[in-house]
Amino acid sequence: MKRLSRRTLLRGAGSIAVALPWLEAMEARAQTPPKKRFVGVFTPCGIVPATWYPTGSGAAFTLNSATTPLEPHKAKLLFFENISNKAALNGPGNAHARGTALLFTGHSLSPEPLFGEAGWNQGISVDQEIAKAIGGATRFKSLEFGVQVNQNTNTGRISYAGPNLPLEPQNNPKVAFDRIFSGVTGGGTPDPAAEALRLQRKSILDSVKADFAALKGTLGTQDNQRLDAHLTSIRELERELIDVLPPAAGCVKPADPATSDPAVVADFMREANFPRVGALQTKLLVTALKCDLTRVATLMWSRGVSLVVHSWAGAGTTNHHALSHLIEDTQTARDNHTKITTWYSQQFASLLAQMDEVVEPNGKTLLDNSVVLWGNELSNGDTHSRNNIPFVLAGSGGGYFRTGRYMKYANTPHNNLLVSCLNAMGVPATTFGKPEFCTGPLSGLTA
Amino acid sequence: MVPPPGKSACHVEPARPKRAAHPESLAIWSVGLTPLERRTTTPRGVPCQKIRRIHAGLPHRRRQAPRLQRPCRGSARMDLYIPRRCMTGVLRRSSILSLLAGALLLVGCDGRSEMLGRGGDGSDGGGDVDPPIYTDFDGGTTTIPPGDPGCDLKAYPAITLEEVKQAFRAQMYPKLTVCAGCHRDGSGRRFLYADTADETFDLAMDVADSHSLSRHPHLSILGRLMSKDPAVRMPKGGQLSDADIAAVDEVTCKLKAYLVNRCGSGGPTPSESPIRRLTRLEYNNTVRALLAEASEPATAWNAEGSALGFSNNVQSLSVSPELARQIFMTAEDVTSPAKLTAAELTALLPCAATGGEACARQFISDFGLRAYRRPVEPAEVTRLVEVWKVGNAAAGFERGARMVIHAMLVSPHFLYRIERGNRAAPGEVVQLTSYEMASRLSYFLWGSMPDKTLLDEAAANRLTTAAQISAQAKRLFDAASPDAKRMAWNFHAEWLGLNSISTLTRDGLTNWTTLRGPMRQETLKLAETVFWEKGDERQLFTSDEYYLTPALGTLYGVSGVTGNYAATKMPPERRGLMTQASILAINSFEDSSSPIHRGKFVREKLLCQPLGTPPDDVPPLPAAIPGQTTRERLSTHSGVAACSMCHKSMDPIGFGLEGFDQVGRYRTSEQGKAVDTSGAIFATMDIDGSFNGPVELAERLAKSEEVGSCIATQWFRFAHGREYLPLADSCSMEQALAAYRASNFNPRELVLAITQSDAFRYRRVSGGTP
């Protein structure tokens, strides 16, 4: 069934905060096929191979110690053996920069030595490719969340709108909240003042768009690309501020982080607040999906070469990156590093649990209708290996993937996995990232 | 030549050099290891301890038993792991094209060779050969002195680029096939050169002109090609005769001659001028000047990427949807009645609000001239009048005026500096318009929008001649101007990497968190004093006067400091920048000093020689011995060729600063042993050799022309928001350097000279092919 043009309906209504009963009904009918969502999750510094990879294969597999928190979701997961970030094996940049920037892009870094030895990634990331296809139906094409991503270089970005167009993750839950849930009230009649403001903003954005249009093509290639990217952002902003696509029926705004966690919000980059900031961001992310304010999101925990000391995980006083360089040496290091990974598994499990609580009109859960891909900068952090990346895929993408399995491959490029994700989201791609590192979708994944 | 499988031609290793290792380097590199230990820890297949923990910033641990991880040698393929990293920007790109480009372009416009013909390093990762140790940092035996006597530039007074290309085609390209025997990737593809000589040459030029290659210490490829020393010569096995090498040399000499000759003749050779988005800092300054809005509203925006140390690099100023929202909401906020009061708004109006649309038009033109830093075009006025009408209809003239300002503040013409006034075909060189020059001057020298005088001069088209530009530059860049001082302050903070100190942790000081701010401040105060008062950049390295708070005085062991940042004479162990607590602490580990990072600081920040980060899989080092000093611990770097390849560039410099711990405190002993501050510096143009202690290091840095030209390069990057491009910008750089030298290294003169250079006054029209 074709999508209902909610945008048209709502333009007519001229409303920012709408929850009309009849709309709800039409929404419900519009739900077949289900709305699909994509979430990309990044964590840094690799894993301890001995405690990560499951045993067994196919549907008969047993989780390893670092992923025990995922046990409740096992049937909705896909684990992978020997999917490698081959794009990140060579090329400009160091292992951390490539491992981070190419995780969701499968492309390459610019050789321009902006950050010591390389620049930004040179391709679009999979979340943005998906957002191009499905992001038009919601207020936000995509949302990028960060948890103390404290480096503004290529180890601090996973999402790219295109070559040299990194998308900064928002580290501040309060700022994220204000942006995402602005005007979401859950009901009421249109506010005339808000409507007047909307029209004024529209005239300003129209003028700006005309400025961009007049500049188009008058500059060099790179300048034109920069302006195009900026204009694209203006169009996104227009959707955000002018179209103001409403949240899904039944959307309940989460608690304002400034109210629920004032001390955390006041110092959101402080290491001690890392777990709580992560929890707040996860909650905002899930609510944004649930409310259908976006269908694509990424969540970046720390950054490549994370220097976070995970004292709350009982992982000692050595920072994550430093610890990763000791795992080939001592059992203590392996234990502590595993504790960090286990902690991240808990956070990932919490994300999945929150998504799995939301029952959607097609009777499935939000998680079922989503593809959630968790990837890592590296596999073995000590050797900086980008082979056998510890990916976990959760949710079946509305029944596209047959989950509950441990899939084994033979040093297969992870670009193939990214293609599978695109296909699951309804994007008919056959290749993604650098073509030489892609041979098409992964075999054997679909239902 | 295709090597047979297994034992490739490149591993027909000539006999080890007979000459003794340089005694100086041995002294530096073998501390803590007896000759016997050196032998037992560096046979082929080295049993080693990992040094990755050093790269990871870990406190050092003692190991019980060394771990045999893998030999400290690469496998048969050169591109595997060892030398690649260290050859920043060269091999890292997996293309020897770029390597060739680097070799071709190691020249400056003054004709001095910047080629660093130090011998090789003996650690090419070439396979199961016994790595020659200590042949790599002899620091003198294969030096090609400045001036490059092998290249007589006068021999080619009028050579053209086409002739250089011909020479390359005939003399150099055929030699490259030899190299492809080893230099190829895993699938057997050569990665040395393109299919045709012309293509290779053009690619090499492209690479050279896109990236900073010209100053890297490991661009010794040409040195290796040309070396008479069989231990370091490339290619291995003597495939190139002396005659071949001479032929290669001649090609590079011709290219140097071409680059030198073209400067000063045939018109300016600027680069393209990319559009530049205002940084958060520039935005804050601009709205302060434009609207008297002092709240620095852009500070809360998503941060720009930090590239080459600077926040104004055009590559890192893209606008994401979230940033677009922040920009929009800030504009809405600063034009709201709460921030821009009715009285303030009225003061901006050139006419009475009762004038209606006519007044709105006049306001758009008048205010727009300042906001867009040029006259507003008629079509733009029309668009903005439409915006005004919407506000006027809703809530009257004032609302319309606020909306006009809001619209301007989110327009690309406000947010970017766009230079396209003088039109010409792509590739042509044009001068900047007076209005464009006004913005270049104000944003470079003040980090803010042009003031009234600049706009008036631009309106009269009086910013075109060198004299006109010079007069305005001198007016703006004056010690009495807080804008100028703020801008120079910001430059130094970013160049020297001082802003990072606010997030760092260092052991050993209970008041670290309160002292780190003053540490940064103190260094910036020194830089400011040198810049504006002393007028001699060399004093940045040699000054015996610091600007201390009482707490800093305590740290330095100087008594009687009163007041804040009071000028204080320092004891003899402290001189200039390099012995200030900020620099020493930032470039340390958490719990110990780091000669590595201190050396890296000198290489990257003061010599403009980027080193990159450690390789993916760093080979292990010999086991540490309990009770070792920092210096002894790092001496293990010298025993492994793969380590010394990079660390020879850093550690020996940092050893000279071992008299200071991780928070910059002076010390004379460590681990119960007297501190050894003998150091050495290699692979520079003019300050190679051994030295003892920080003062001698400071004196060297102060006298180095290479350091001086690096400082000019840093200013160039800051001025243009992009990397210095060797091919396109070398003449402009030479113009600025000449003035800098002539002024006895007065940094203000350098900055003023940059505004006089071709790169600043002209631009190459960008766009597709004409």
Image (tube, coloured by chain):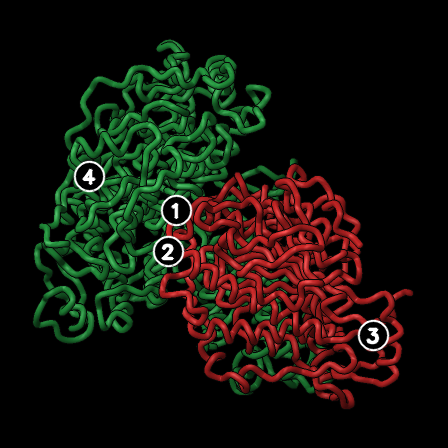
Query: Residue B739's image quarter?
Result: top left
- Disc 3 marks a residue whose amino acid type is Pro
Question: Mark 4: few, some, or many residues within 10 Å (few <14, many ≥20)?
Answer: many
Which residue does the numbered mark 3 point to in the structure image? A361
Question: Farthest right residue?
Answer: A1
Which residue does the numbered mark 1 point to in the structure image? B756
Which residue is located at x 58 percent, y 67 percent?
A69
Chain shaded red: A
Residue B680: numbered disc: 4
- Disc 1 marks a residue whose amino acid type is Gln
Secondary element at image label 1: loop
Nearer to us: label 4 or label 3: 3
Residue B338: numbered disc: none
The answer to the question of whether label 2 and label 1 lie on touching residues, with beta carbons closer than 8 A, is yes
Q: Quick one: B623 or A371, which is closer to the camera? A: B623
Which residue does the numbered mark 2 point to in the structure image? B473
